[in-house]
Structure formats: C-alpha cells, structure tokens
Image (cartoon, grey):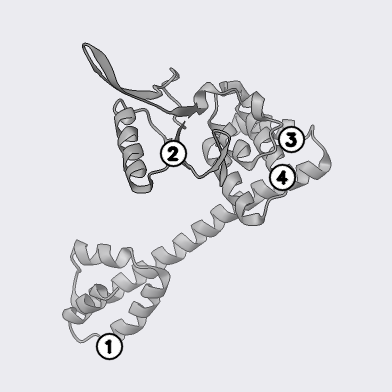
Amino acid sequence: MAKFRGEDSTFLIHVENESSSKADFNRRFFKYFCTLFLKYDAPIYPIVVFSYDSPLRLDVSSFTVDFPDSRVLAFDYKIIQLNQLDWRDFVENQNPVAAALMSKMNIAQEDRPRVKLECLRLLVSLELDPARMELISGFVDTYLNLDAIEEQVFQSRLGTISLEKQEQIMQLTTSWKEQGRQEGRQEGLLEGKVHTILRQLNRKFGTLDSAISNKISVLNSEQLDSLTEELLDFQSFEDLERFLDNC
C-alpha cells in the first residue's frame, strides 16, 4: 500500500532496462504497459532505464497516435538515460545502485580511473553483504575495465585515500583476480577431461563425428566424470549415444 493522489492505494511500478537504442521501443513499451494494465487493472508508473553508451542524444519518452484532426493517444513514461547523467552528482549518494550505475554514466575518457575508484569507495562504505558486494563490484569492473595506463592512474589515486578504505578496495580487486584464476583453472580442468575422454572414445569406436564431440564438450564436470566411468562398459557406439541422450 502507498499514497496515490492523497489516498491509500495500490499501484505498480514498471521498470524496463534497455541496453541499446531502438527506434520502435516506445511502441513496444506501450504494448507492455497495456498488457500489465489489462492483467492487473491498477495504476502503473512506467520507467525506462537506458544504459547504452551511444547515441548521446536524449531518447524519446512517449508514444503517440495522431490523426489529422486530433491526437487519440499519448502515452508518456519516465526515462533515466545514464549517458545523460553526470557521475559527480552521485558520488555521495549512499545507494548501492548508484555505485553500480555510475560506471555507465557520462564519463570523460580521462576520468575513467577516478570514477572506478569513486564507485568502489562508495561501495565499501555501504557495508553490504558479500554476495551483493561481489555482484556490484563485478558490474563496475566489467564496465570500467581499465587499460594498463588507466590502471596506473587508478593505483596512484588509490594511494590518496585512507588506509582502511585502501585495504577494503584492494580486497575487492584481489577477489576479481582470484575469481578469474579459479575460473581459468576450472575451465582448464574441464578441457583436460574432455580431451582425455575423446581420446579414449576415438580408440574404442574410431574417430567420432563433430556432432558427438560437440555434445561431449558441453557436458559439466559431474557428467564428464560419469562418462569416464561408464565408457569402460560401453559395448557399442549406441551405448554412447544413449548416455548422451540422457544427459
């Protein structure tokens, strides 16, 4: 329940995120609005978050249907276009969403290291739980992935803040690197398992066709372990096909 037009009421907030600019989006958004309105028969406040980098022009915020003698439909919606926002206006905003979305706002190329540091400084000050901290920091790292020169500037700026904040930010950036190493190790282990299994199957049944090889290459670690055990008992190629069909 919330206040709507001065009275207790229930209404929906419909939020869409668009990562690219499309000419027909306003028409599609109106269709989404109609679907929700027909389903719930309640007031709806429509909002669009435009998170694309370009174009920089302000996107449309309405859908209209006009005839020569009158306008028969005017559907207006609120837009939040990140590349129109100045990241400096959100530096002191104690909101985890601001910490994430600053990385998609209007940022001059030379400001990228500073903005990344400000995003992370804000993030560590919020004292979020580890899962949300990892999610938001990963978002920042993805969209503000610095090159070698920018990384030097980032490290130089990092040295200007308090030691406590430095340590917290370094823990975040270290966790990104460790996660990357772990993912790399896991990927390498899976590739090794697939390679070994394919060698064994090629010796058992002859060269496998690409369709079978592709099915094996996308199995997860547990399925690959099971295949390693089962293939010892395969009597025919059909046994392998049955195993893959059941995965």
Q: As rendered, which of 241 and 72 lies closer to the eye?
A: 72
Find residue 172 and name its label: none
Q: Are marks 4 and 2 in contact (CB under 8 Å)?
A: no
Residue carrying label 4 = 126
| Residue 146 showing in the rendered view | no
Q: Which amino acid, by three-letter code, is at mark 1? A: Asp
Residue carrying label 2 = 43
Q: Earlier in the sequence, mark 2 or mark 3?
A: 2
Crowd class of label 4 (few under 14; some 14 to 19; many from 20; radius 10 Å): some
- Element at label 1: helix
Residue carrying label 1 = 233
Crowd class of label 1 (few under 14; some 14 to 19; many from 20; radius 10 Å): few
Residue carrying label 3 = 158
Q: Which amino acid, by three-letter code, is at mark 2? A: Pro
Mark 3–mark 4 Cα distance, whole angstroms, equals 18 Å
Q: Give x and y (percent) for residue 213.
A: 25, 65
Q: Which amino acid, by three-letter code, is at mark 3? A: Leu
Q: Residue at x 52, y 36 (%)?
A: 143
- Of marks 3 and 4, the one in the foreground: 4
Mark 2–mark 3 Cα distance, whole angstroms, equals 47 Å
Crowd class of label 2 (few under 14; some 14 to 19; many from 20; radius 10 Å): some
Residue 119 versus residue 245 in the image, above or below: above
Q: Residue at x 26, y 76 (%)?
A: 246
Q: Are marks 2 and 1 in contact (CB under 8 Å)?
A: no
Q: Give x and y (percent) for residue 242.
A: 21, 78
